[in-house]
Image: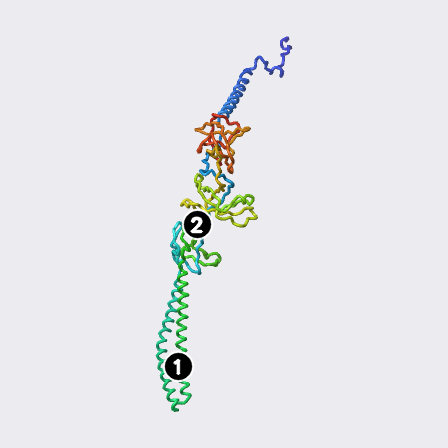
Amino acid sequence: MADMNSKTPTPGLSALRIDDHKRGGKPFAKWLGIGLLLALIIAAALGAGSVLRNRRPEVVLASAAAPPANGAATLLNASGYVTPRNRASVAAKITGKIVTVFVDEGTVVKQGQILAQLDDSDYRVSMASTKADRDATVALIPDLQFQLGNAQRDLARTKGLADQGVMTPQALDAAQTLVDRLKAQINSAKVQVDAANAKIGIDQQNIDNCQIRSPFDGIVVSKDAQPGEMISPISAGGGFTRTGIATVVDMSSLEIEVDVNENFIARVKPHMRVMATLDAYPDWQIPAYVRTIIPTADRDKGTVKVRATFEHLDPRILPDMGIKVAFLGDPARKEKGAAAPVALVPQAALHTTGAQSALFVYHDGTLERRAVRTGSTRGSDVEVLSGIAPGDLVVVKGPDNLQDGEKVERKEQQ
């Protein structure tokens, strides 16, 4: 009974607590994982920084140009286009249907050469009808002349009989009237023949107008119509009628047309020497001279048109090509002992510190800093008296901290 009366202790919530010394695992493994992750992140950052540090700087290059042989200074630069002085959009004088076009783009044509043929059937039919009427009238004239001869003989006999009192005055008047009427009929027939010949001439002119010819020697640069289309000297038919057959350019009349800012037009003189450079051939310098200065200004653009003539034409020069022009002054008079420029470089290539000028020359991915002597400025270029040679590649754009002997990457200029 004593055992039954003894109380057995009841477990509480505190019995579920686990002592710290009995917990499984250690915090060391968790901190080790975090440390490894941080190490990987730092290593990746250091690697990226090393790549960026080892990356070569990019530079834009330009080639040093040879100075003009005559030593003339550039007074002004301008841009424009090649334009022909003789350019014609050849059209028909009459309205008609195109039968054949004999030319295509690039065809060389001579003055008077037929470019296209219009339908001339209506004019030929009209001419044939007029010729038939003329021939019929011409055939009547001999018969009228024969009748006139007979009437003149009757008039002579009537006059003789009237003088003798045998014929009445009425008979004499009738004979005279017949002669006059026949003469009038003959004259009328001749006038009709002349009118028919004139009408034939008009038909022939219309037939000739159906042959569209080149107005001068040149090259066809545009074919504007096709066989079967209607053509007219004026626009008609709601836009379905052509007004031109082809465009012909006289290639011997090609010249330069540029717009010069009116603030600098005083520098340009007639017959002034010009050095032109086509956008298509930037390394080809073409000598030219100013032909005329158009005596009017464009108020919207503030420019004056100047036309220059090529000294020698070349097949590579084509109409509407873009061109840059350098207006040259008189050849520089070299003083005794004065140094001549050896090359021209863009102003952006020079690094000037005080009185010292230098530039970076590129060779096989490596830069070389060179001290140079500079001369006068020619437009956007500077004369270099010593230190480089024409054809050397110089840096015109790049980081400010470039160094001698530094490895760089070449970047194309945009």
Q: Give me the C-alpha separation between circle 2 and circle 1.
A: 68 Å
Q: Are marks 2 and 1 in contact (CB under 8 Å)?
A: no
Q: Residue furthest front?
A: 336
Q: Amino acid at mark 1?
A: Val
Q: Position of residue 388 (x, y in %)?
A: 46, 30
Disc 1 secondary structure class: helix
What is the three-letter code of the residue carrying label 2?
A: Ser
Q: Position of residue 368 (x, y in %)?
A: 47, 27
Image coordinates for residue 305, horizontal then vertical, percent: 52, 47
Against 407, residue 263 (above or below) is below
Q: Tell me: residue 230, above or below residue 135.
A: above
Residue 159's mark? none
* Secondary element type, mark 2: helix
Looking at marks 2 and 1 on the same chain, the residue that comes earlier in the sequence is marked by: 1
Above or below for 291 versus 382: below
Q: Residue furthest bottom?
A: 165
Q: Which residue is mark 1?
A: 179
Nearest to the observer: residue 47 or residue 69: 69
- Graded by Cα atoms within 10 Å as few (under 14), some (14 to 19) or many (20 or more), the crowding at tag 1 reads many
Image point (52%, 36%), residue name: 377
Question: Residue tagged by mark 2?
Answer: 253
- For label 2, count other residues whose C-alpha is less than 10 Å away and answer few (under 14), some (14-19) or many (20+): some
Residue 5 lies left or right of residue 204; in this view the side is right
